[in-house]
Amino acid sequence: MVKKYNNRPAWIVLILVICSAIVYSLSYSANSKSVRTDTTTAQKENTPPKNNQFSNHKNAGENENCFKCHGQSKYSYENSESKKTATKKMFVELIIDRSVFYESNHREFKCIDCHSEDYNTFPHQGNLRMEAKPNCLDCHGGDEKYAKFHFENIEKEFQESVHSEKHSQDFTCWMCHNPHTYKINARPNENIKQTIAYDNAICLNCHGNLSNYQLLTDKANPNLLTKHDWIPNQKLHFLSVRCVECHTKKINDSTLVAHKILPKKEAVRNCDQCHSSNSVLMAALYKYKIKEVRSAKGFFKGVITNDSYVIGANRNYYLNVLSLVIAGFVILVIIIHAFLRTL
């Protein structure tokens, strides 16, 4: 009798070995590619920009003296003692993205317009860290060129805000508006959502970041989701409304954004302050909607509904009256019908 052997298990093992080899090969290739990509990204990040990339800006050449260190994660210098070139990591909070700076409001300034000229000497003197930074009025106050922005009114509102009253001189314009990145975020029809995200990110830079929050206080940073859990459709609110709509008081119509931040007890909590024909949103976030049409009795197909839904935004006085008349007529018919049934 010839004994037959079942070779299928051997074939299965062989197939598994081949598959494993293929998977390993692909994995190794992907990892190698990933490492090469990361290395390339790092090299690109630490490489100065091409000569003409930002040359169209007024002081780009002079500013590059600062950006060659503060524009990337590493910088090099010659050690005067050892006469060797040393390479160090730049502190993250001191890195300034060139591309973002040259899109900001201050892109045409020289670094030493705001910082001491002593920074031109390296290594920098330690006491330069203590220098007072200019505030908005130091440059823009009383300047006719910037009169349309009403910086004096903004300063007055800010001085009455809870930020200024609680933290005094420790809280400056730069706590919210980074001078190296800040830019005016105009509110035309097409970018309301971007405006909301941009402005809310300013608040979250402290209220969503414990490290920044505790630069001014030792208190624990409150959980924003828990503190706002009374809001229905919380996520939708956060995406469609700026923090300042509920946490500021509008003093006048001359400023784009109210700067009088209210104590939390005075923040808006009544739904009808926003969800009505007299909505506070109409006087702030949606004030500059170009195609918005408003009447004394309400809205006629307000453009506001294109971006977010606000109850009552397209309510019309005459339709309300007509609906009441129809409802009253129906009730009258029911009463007459009931009376006739009793006869």
Image: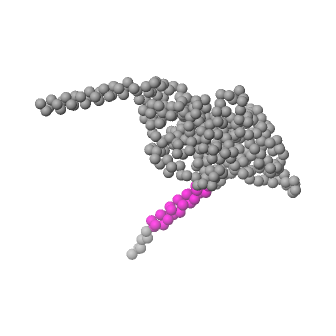
Q: Quadrant of the N terminus?
A: bottom left
* Residue that extends furthest to the left in the rendered view of this protein: 343
Residue 30 % position (x, y): 60, 53
Quadrant in the rendering for residue 132: top right
Q: Is residue 126 left or right of residue 140?
A: right
Picture residue at 73% right of the left edge, 36% below the top: 138
The residue depicted at 87 percent of the width and 57 percent of the height is: 82
Quadrant containing the C terminus is top left
Q: Is residue 248 above or below residue 254?
A: below
> Magenta includes 196?
no
Which residues fall within the magenta stretch? 7-31
Residue 145 locus on image (x, y percent): 71, 27
Q: Nearer the viewer, residue 204 or 56?
A: 204
Q: Is residue 278 left or right of residue 215?
A: left
List x then y, in percent, for residue 298: 44, 27
Q: Residue at x 69, y 29 (%)?
A: 146
Q: Residue at x 80, y 51 (%)?
A: 126
